[in-house]
Image: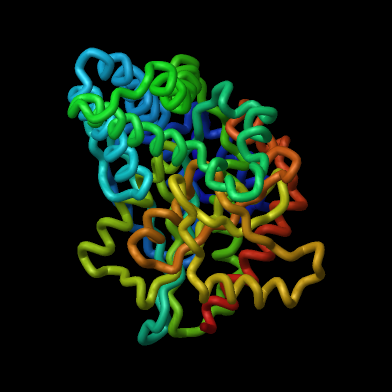
Amino acid sequence: MTALPATTPRLTPVDRVRTLEELGPRRLTGSDTEKAAQAMLGRELESLGYQLDWRPFTWTQSLYASLLLHFGTAALATGVGFSAPFLGAGLHAVVALSYTLESLRKGLVLRSLFPRITSQNLVATRPARGPRRKRLVLIAHADAAYTGVVFTPSLIKAATKQPPPGLGWFKKSLGLATATVALLAVLELLAGLGVWSAPGWLRGLVTVPAVLTALLNLDVVLRNRVVPGAADNLSGCTACVELAYRLEGKLPDDVELVIVISGAEEAGTGGAQRLAEQVVASGEWTPADTVVLGLDTLSNGTLRILEEGELWPLPIARPLVEAVADVNASLPESARVPTYVIPTGATDALPFLVRGFQSVSLTCIDPDIGAPRHYHHPTDTWSNMDAGQLDASIDFAERLILRLSKA
């Protein structure tokens, strides 16, 4: 691992990404490299007057192992259901309930069977200069992702292709897989009660989404390969620090700015979920005075505001929609930021959104792929980032933050 300098001078956004990337490989949840990246960013924020608060938490390291457990169990349960329909129904019901709770960031059931590791969130605060009216939170994750066949651009393009009219929900691949698992529970319950026994071909067909999901995630688990994660999401981390410089002296005196460099996002938004649980339980942050803006992958595509939701769409809060519209109105049409509905996965905005906060993320999407270029690939390096788009994304984020600070 590269030794960190005693002091960190101001770097350009791309140079900061390069320096972070060079700290070391396998920047996984709970790794020393994840914490080293957070520490480097923290030192620079501290030099700007931010108060640093390290908040450790426990989580499991691999989202893909969790998906494999859920949908692999569902696939096996179909076989069990032919001879023991009530047992099959029970297994399918547990999987559907467990993944629904996990996807809504409401709790872990099957995933709690995995060992926990310790990660941390860095919460850096620039207090309001006087009584606080509003808290603006910028959040970006320091950890990097695993790779696998599921992230092949052609597969992503096929998965994100707009389906026929009226079937838009089928873009939610994990939503489809979870719904079919729930349907299998119903079919097996009907068979166990003697009401109706669905033919084997029908049960097999309904099991296909679970089988495909399990196999794709098995590939990721067996590869055990971690990408550099320059665009996703060192670009968001460097944007947070760059915005700390740019916003100095520009925010109203009654606005508190908080920058969170989270851990475990690629493991299923673990850091954001633990932080959201903590600040809600303690009353430290409330939806009434806190707005959360996620900065996640600000290069290798064109900027979008994301509509979250793994199982079904979760609408963006109206004040955020209006703020984005106001910023867009001040820009030429080519620079405006439209909404993009996430087909699968989530960002650090989601755990706050489901707890009632105004929360949304900015992300770059290449429309030819349906994801950022180099998404979860070994080629996601600092040298493959679009530096111009990174600068443009930071410019838009600054405009949006200033607009939100005055609302």
Q: Position of residue 103 (x, y in %)?
A: 37, 44
In this view, 166 is above or below 174: below
The residue lying at 68 percent from left, 55 percent from top is: 303
In this view, 385 is above or below 83: below
Count of all numbered marks drawn on residues in the image: 0
Q: Position of residue 212 (x, y in %)?
A: 49, 22
The residue lying at 39 percent from left, 36 percent from top is: 178
In this view, 346 is above or below 293: above
Q: Is residue 115 visible?
A: no
Q: Is residue 285 visible?
A: yes
Q: Nearer the viewer, residue 48 or 321?
A: 321
Q: Nearer the viewer, residue 117 or 336?
A: 336
Q: Where is residue 71 in the image (x, y as percent from the top left)?
A: 37, 26
Q: Where is residue 255 in the image (x, y as percent from the top left)?
A: 45, 79
Residue 227's quadrant in the figure?
A: top right
Instruction: Please give left or right for residue 306 compared with residue 128 in the image.
Output: right
